[in-house]
Image (cartoon, grey):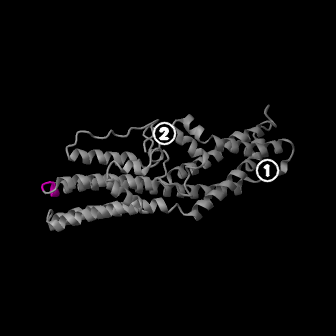
Amino acid sequence: MHSGKRFGALEFAAWTRRSIYVLTVLSAIPTVLYFLGWKFVSVPWQPIAILGTAVAFIVGFKNNASYSRLWEARQIYGAIINDSRSFGYILRDSLSAKDQEKVKEMFLRHYAWLTALRFQLREPRAWENMGTAQFDEYSRKYDIPERLSQLDDEMKKYISEAELQYILSKKNRATQLMASQSKELSEAYTKGDINDFQWTQINQQLVKFTDSQGKAERIKNFPYPRNFSSITTYLLMLFILFVPFGILKELDKLGEGTALEGLTIWFNIPFSLMVTWCFHTLDSVGEASVNPFEGSPNDVPITQISRTIEIDMRDMLDESDLPPAITPKNNIVL
């Protein structure tokens, strides 16, 4: 998540510079041909304007869908924050008098669940963008914690070696950790350490965590539909290719009867670049938000949120040695 006021203009230009190079060349080719006498390369601008309208609609639709996915992901982790706090004090107040060690063990296992979940959500998918040059280069400005450490090293801070090996042998580690929590809770209920009402309350919190995990996995594992993504790309490419051909005559006429006659055709390069850059960058902005767990600067900061939850829950147990909060690096926090 970018935590500054805005992306800087130079920063934005650097992020899109590859597209600027390509768009400049695409604008220059028809301009040079027209200047050399190939007047037939000019095409009417009206069909291009109609195409541009269609592109504007579909890029706008894509960006709206991208924002919806991002906002839903943030709501999911907002629910995890609230439910974790509720789980913490309900568990503490229900079980501490009977088995304080079990309370601490279940707290630690919850931190392990948060850890396993964030590592699962950071796993790359074929449709994500972090492998492209544009996004990969920008990622060097900040740290993606899940790429700097291993899951087993992080989880061994919270659970025993035997349980760690058992969890690592499973495909969905976060699910198995929540299943272990349910098993511990069931054992406490069987022993009479908690009553029916307390068991129901705590179990409801575990169900909420499972529900939130499933929602996050749905966003992670189901991409923005490929048919919409593909048609957006193809229409955008057509528009970008034809714009420089569509305003050649209009710009050539601009200098008629003036000292610039014959030279205004060169205005085609900056004007075409400006129009096509706007559309292409709008599409790139949508791509930067459409996968909210991949590790981009526009992602939901799930690592920071997980650390915040851990600090809050440790504070509930009056622990003094709290882990440090995660702070932004170059205005980026994940």
Q: Nearer the viewer, residue 102 or 120?
A: 102
Q: Is residue 110 above or below residue 275?
A: below
Looking at the image, is mark 2 or mark 1 nearer the viewer? Answer: 2
Residue 83 picture location, percent across and down: 28, 56
Q: Quadrant of residue 24?
A: top right
Q: Is residue 137 above or below residue 208?
A: above
Residue under the point 78% across and 45% down: 29
Horizontal arrangement in the rendering, residue 227 relative to residue 177 (left or right): right
Q: Nearer the viewer, residue 321 or 294?
A: 321
Q: Amino acid at mark 1?
A: Ser
The magenta-colored residue range is 93-97
Residue 82 picture location, percent across and down: 28, 53
**Which badge, 2 or 1, is on the more N-terminal residue?**
1
Q: Using the image, tell me which numbered label, if any, was put on residue 142.
A: 2
Looking at the rendered image, the quarter that the N terminus falls into is top left
**SS type, badge 1:** loop
Query: Badge 1 is on which residue?
Result: 42
Residue under the point 82% across and 37% down: 262
Residue under the point 39% across and 55% down: 116
Category of crowding for the residue at label 2, using alpha-carbon neighbours closer than 10 angstroms: few (below 14), some (14–19), many (at least 20):
some
